[in-house]
Image (tube, rainbow, N blue to C red):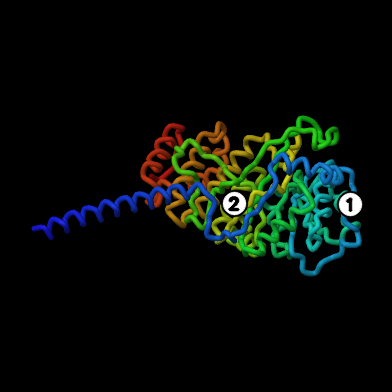
């Protein structure tokens, strides 16, 4: 009896300890969703400057770029047959500020690079300016679109022509914060053999034309970018836990703060297909790029280096005032997301949330009068509604929302 009693108590104690351990493991699993992956850490501490220190230290560099001053000797601008880095920039009607963007690249202390400029059928003097800059720097490569194709296509064409081992995609209103950005981030990428290394950016919101301001006098905001939509090493978990279907946030979907292996980016674009990256996109192209990249990449690292100055210009190419185009771009985004996010059950939450956004666009009914967009959208809707892959509560929700706005033609 004594032995039985001891065994009984011992069994109960083991059971309690086991339950406690399981509980802790579950809690840790949930907590890890909101942190940066650790598996690919290269166990090296980086002591990067704060946002204010980074910004203050960069003023001289930025002013040199604005004043067309070269820090590097121009003799270094020789054509490399095997560049380490390709900087890819779509260009559209940006004659007033594209020069400072290119100067911030030319003034990097990493000179083994190519600068790929995709002229998206600009109607101002942007092309003439690019051609003049090319005469000064043989590392510059110009690609001319035969018509205005939008940001996604232009960036994709540039990426597919890249020869460097790594790609830094920029918008034509971006610039590097200091001369060390490319060398620091590329070295981290090489040392850890990461597919994607993400770093921080600073955004400046211009109240007037940049020509009337020195950069150091404007207000800026912090893009910490310390979370991504998809973390490959955490089973591609798409969004933070605890968010409802109505709270769809695009976190760190900016392509302009990433260093990406060229073969990974090209593989992702080839998987997407020319038919889809040729669609006219002026919005959500960064989300599409993020979706295809993080569905292809297998390693990722975030570092706290502030490397990009993103300047919101009043007439920036990324600002859309046409609600019709915006709605079409949302439907294109939904189509790509469905194709690339059916790989794990971790993706099931994001698709219905994009659908929610589309269903509540004020001009959706007008856009669906076009048979092409109507057919594509209904195809997306039916894929979600008729698939057991998605949570039933989401499918019921989308079904009810569709009925509430009088959508017809779906096969439930």
Mark 2, secondary structure of its residue? helix
Q: Where does residue 71 sit, x and y in percent of width and height? A: 88, 52
The answer to whether residue 271 is left or right of residue 148 is: left
Q: Nearer the viewer, residue 163 or 126?
A: 163
Q: Residue at x 77, y 69 (%)?
A: 82
Q: Residue at x 64, y 62 (%)?
A: 266
Q: Is any part of residue 391 visible from this angle?
A: yes
Q: Quadrant of residue 275?
A: bottom right
Q: Gap between marks 1 and 2, in whole Å?
A: 34 Å
The answer to whether residue 72 is left or right of residue 197 is: right
Numbered badge on residue 178: none
Q: Where does residue 31 sit, x and y in percent of width and height? A: 45, 47
The answer to whether residue 244 is left or right of residue 117 is: left
Front of the two marks 1 and 2: 1
Quadrant containing the N terminus in the rendered view: bottom left
Residue that lies at the very extreme toward the bottom in this rendered image? 81
Q: Is any part of residue 279 visible from this angle?
A: no
Q: Nearer the viewer, residue 373 or 11?
A: 11
Quadrant containing the C terminus in the rendered view: top left
Q: Where does residue 322 sit, x and y in percent of width and height? A: 66, 35
Q: Where does residue 43 sit, x and y in percent of width and height? A: 59, 60
Q: Is residue 247 above or below residue 11?
A: above
Residue behind mark 1: 70
Numbered badge on residue 290: 2
Residue that lies at the very extreme toward the front in this rendered image? 2
Q: Residues within 10 Å of mark 1 (few under 14, many from 20)?
A: some
Q: Residue at x 73, y 33 (%)?
A: 219
Q: Is residue 49 above or below residue 158?
A: above
């Amino acid at each position: 009896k004594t032995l039985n009693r001891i065994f009984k108590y011992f069994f109960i104690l083991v059971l309690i300890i086991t339950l406690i351990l399981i509980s802790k493991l579950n809690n840790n699993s949930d907590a890890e969703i909101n942190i940066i992956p650790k598996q690919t850490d290269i166990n090296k501490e980086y002591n990067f400057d704060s946002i204010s220190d980074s910004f203050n230290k960069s003023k001289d560099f930025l002013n040199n770029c604005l004043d067309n001053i070269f820090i590097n000797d121009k003799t270094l601008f020789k054509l490399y047959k095997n560049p380490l880095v390709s900087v890819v920039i779509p260009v559209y009607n940006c004659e007033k500020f594209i020069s400072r963007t290119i100067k911030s690249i030319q003034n990097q202390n990493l000179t083994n690079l190519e600068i790929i400029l995709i002229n998206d059928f600009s109607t101002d003097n942007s092309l003439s300016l690019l051609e003049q800059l090319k005469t000064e720097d043989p590392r510059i490569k110009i690609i001319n679109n035969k018509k205005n194709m939008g940001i996604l296509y232009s960036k994709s064409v540039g990426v597919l022509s890249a020869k460097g081992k790594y790609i830094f995609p920029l918008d034509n209103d971006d610039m590097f914060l200091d001369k060390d950005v490319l060398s620091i981030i590329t070295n981290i990428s090489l040392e850890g053999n990461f597919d994607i290394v993400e770093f921080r950016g600073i955004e400046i919101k211009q109240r007037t034309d940049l020509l009337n301001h020195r950069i150091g006098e404007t207000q800026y905001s912090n893009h910490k970018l310390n979370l991504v939509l998809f973390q490959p090493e955490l089973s591609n978990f798409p969004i933070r836990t605890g968010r409802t279907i109505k709270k769809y946030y695009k976190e760190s979907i900016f392509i302009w703060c990433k260093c990406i292996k060229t073969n990974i980016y090209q593989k992702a674009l080839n998987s997407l297909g020319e038919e889809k990256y040729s669609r006219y996109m002026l919005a959500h192209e960064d989300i599409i790029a993020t979706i295809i990249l993080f569905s292809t990449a297998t390693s990722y690292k975030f570092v706290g280096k502030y490397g990009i100055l993103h300047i919101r210009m009043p007439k920036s190419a990324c600002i859309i005032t046409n609600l019709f185009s915006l709605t079409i771009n949302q439907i294109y985004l939904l189509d790509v997301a469905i194709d690339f996010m059916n790989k794990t059950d971790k993706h099931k939450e994001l698709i219905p949330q994009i659908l929610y956004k589309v269903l509540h666009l004020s001009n959706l009914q007008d856009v669906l009068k076009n048979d092409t967009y109507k057919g594509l959208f209904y195809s997306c809707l039916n894929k979600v509604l008729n698939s057991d892959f998605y949570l039933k509560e989401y499918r019921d929700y989308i079904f009810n929302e569709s009925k509430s706005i009088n959508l017809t033609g779906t096969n439930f």
